[in-house]
Image (spheres, rainbow, N blue to C red):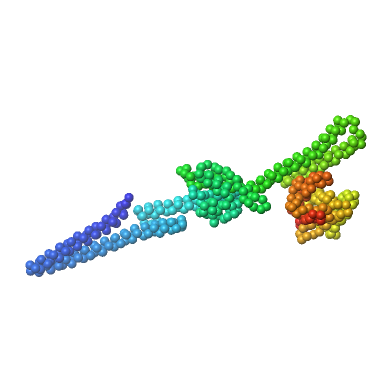
């Protein structure tokens, strides 16, 4: 609504224009009367009319000049704020949301400037909120270990986080705007998204991606995306890489099956022998003693198996190896070799030990490290024939202590080397059981090494013996 002072300026200009128009009419009227008086010979009247003609001309010129000046300044006063608003609007449209219009003058233009600035502030706040929410959403999606892929109604990719890029073997930049089946070669994922778009319901699926050393297993959960009016606008899929979970589930199942089998064998033997002894009162004393020896051996095997399982359970928890402290690794090595010297002599195996004269200090649990040496040495003696040799060498290797246990035993084929440290894995199951092995010794060695931030490796060839090498970081001097 126009205000009074604005109307006054325009009214003044309008009146001046009217005066100028009236003056121009009078000017031409006076000029006509002057011409008629001159023709009739009335020179005095003509002279007076000519004088009046000059006055009218002056009034007309002054009125036109004043009207033009008022119109110029009025239009300039209106045009400048409008130009400021136009420039600010163009800047905001270009992304500069901090633009403001100067608030000066009065009346309608001041109200327009204030309203425009208020609108700009609200728009800036809303854009900042949207930008902040988008950054937070991208940060959340980028930090997820699950892959997230969003497509529109035409199955074109609108978003893909880093985890999904790794799972699908592509990049988010290259995938944006392209059909999902153009960037994803895993059919099950594309089909699950298509079903979600078609049905409008949550869909589930499972996909496999061929990889080495094992296939990648991916669980797919796809859900439709709807707008504020509940119209279907796309779909989003969450990809879970469950390869490790499936592998661990398989390992757990195998472990349970192996434990059940390993426990069942000595228990069944003990039960059968005990029942025979209890039911056969006429059994010869020599046979009874032989049965009792077998029961004793099976009970020892059962006890060893249970102890090994408890050791692995302890190593699998965060509470394992709480007594880690600096120790000279030569001590558990020497003590273990001395303890096995008698067994080596009985089997006719030459046992050699080479340790440096200076201390090799590591930080760890002495009992656990002694068990590492004991398990490796026991394994070497079991699979080395009479007349063979088992050698232990303890050395420094850079910032690590290296213990090598070398034997001249039966050795292993290369296909067994990657699995030899698995629980209950045996190269020769019958021979291992006959020798009293539980199949857990090397698994315990591996876990103890990992607890000490070290590792164990093996080199072997069938018929040429084996060499197990343990590397542990040296203790840092305080």
- Residue at 68%, 47% (x, y): give it: 247
- Residue at 51%, 51% (x, y): give it: 156
Q: Position of residue 158 (x, y in %)?
A: 51, 51
Q: Is residue 140 visible?
A: no
Query: Looking at the image, how many numbered discs can be counted on the residues?
Result: 0
Q: Position of residue 437 (x, y in %)?
A: 81, 45
Q: Is residue 155 visible?
A: yes
Nearer to the camera, 253 or 56: 253
Nearer to the camera, 442 or 374: 442
Nearer to the camera, 132 or 468: 468
Q: Position of residue 31 (x, y in %)?
A: 15, 65
Classify 228 as above or below 94.
above
Q: Is residue 471 left or right of residue 139?
A: right
Nearer to the camera, 150 or 220: 220
Q: Quadrant of the C terminus?
A: bottom right
Question: From this viewpoint, which residue is outermost toward the right?
Answer: 285
Q: Position of residue 84 (x, y in %)?
A: 39, 59
Question: From this viewpoint, which residue is outermost toward the left?
Answer: 40
Q: Is residue 128 left or right of residue 334?
A: left
Classify 106 as above or below 42.
above
- Residue at 90%, 31% (x, y): give it: 282
Task: State the image quarter where residue 392 is shown.
Answer: bottom right
- Residue at 55%, 47% (x, y): give it: 191
Q: Is residue 75 left or right of residue 337?
A: left
Q: Is residue 434 left or right of residue 190?
A: right
């Amino acid at each position: 609504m126009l205000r009074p002072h604005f109307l006054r300026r325009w009214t003044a200009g309008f009146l001046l224009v009217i005066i100028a128009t009236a003056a121009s009419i009078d000017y031409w009227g006076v000029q006509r009367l002057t011409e008629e008086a001159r023709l009739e010979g009335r020179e005095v009247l003509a002279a007076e009319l000519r004088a009046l003609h000059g006055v009218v001309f002056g009034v007309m010129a002054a009125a036109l000049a004043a009207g033009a000046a008022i119109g110029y300044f009025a239009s300039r006063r209106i045009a400048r704020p409008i130009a400021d608003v136009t420039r600010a609007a163009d800047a905001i449209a270009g992304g500069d949301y901090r633009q403001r219009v100067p608030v000066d003058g009065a009346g309608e233009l001041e109200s327009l400037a204030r309203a425009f600035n208020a609108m700009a502030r609200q728009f800036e706040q809303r854009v900042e909120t949207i930008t902040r929410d988008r950054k937070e959403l991208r940060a959340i999606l980028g930090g997820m270990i699950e892959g997230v892929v969003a497509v529109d109604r035409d199955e074109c990719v609108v978003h893909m986080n880093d985890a999904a890029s790794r799972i699908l073997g592509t990049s988010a930049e290259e995938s944006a705007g392209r059909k999902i089946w153009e960037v994803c070669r895993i059919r099950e994922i594309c089909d699950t998204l298509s079903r979600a778009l078609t049905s409008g319901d949550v869909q589930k699926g499972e996909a496999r991606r061929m990889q080495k050393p094992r296939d990648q297993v991916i669980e797919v959960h796809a859900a439709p995306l709807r707008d504020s009016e509940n119209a279907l606008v796309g779909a989003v899929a969450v990809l879970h890489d469950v390869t490790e979970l499936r592998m661990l589930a398989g390992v757990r199942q195998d472990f349970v099956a192996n434990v059940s089998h390993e426990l069942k064998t000595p228990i069944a033997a003990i039960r059968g022998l005990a029942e025979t002894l209890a039911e056969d009162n006429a059994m010869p004393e020599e046979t009874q003693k032989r049965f009792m020896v077998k029961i004793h051996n099976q009970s020892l095997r059962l006890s060893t198996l249970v102890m090994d399982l408890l050791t692995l359970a302890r190593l699998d928890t965060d509470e394992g190896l709480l007594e880690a402290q600096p120790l000279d690794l030569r001590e558990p090595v020497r003590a273990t070799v001395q303890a096995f010297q008698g067994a080596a002599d009985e089997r006719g195996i030459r046992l050699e030990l080479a340790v440096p004269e200076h201390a090799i200090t590591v930080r760890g649990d002495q009992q656990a490290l002694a068990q590492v040496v004991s398990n490796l040495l026991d394994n070497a003696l079991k699979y080395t024939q009479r007349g063979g040799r088992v050698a232990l060498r303890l050395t420094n290797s850079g910032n690590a202590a290296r213990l090598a246990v070398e034997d001249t035993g039966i050795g292993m084929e290369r296909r067994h080397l990657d699995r030899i440290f698995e629980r209950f894995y045996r190269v020769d199951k019958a021979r291992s059981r006959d020798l009293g092995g539980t199949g857990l010794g090397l698994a315990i060695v591996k876990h103890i090494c990992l607890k000490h931030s070290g590792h164990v490796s093996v080199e072997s060839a069938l018929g040429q013996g084996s060499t197990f090498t343990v590397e542990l970081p040296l203790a840092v001097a305080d």
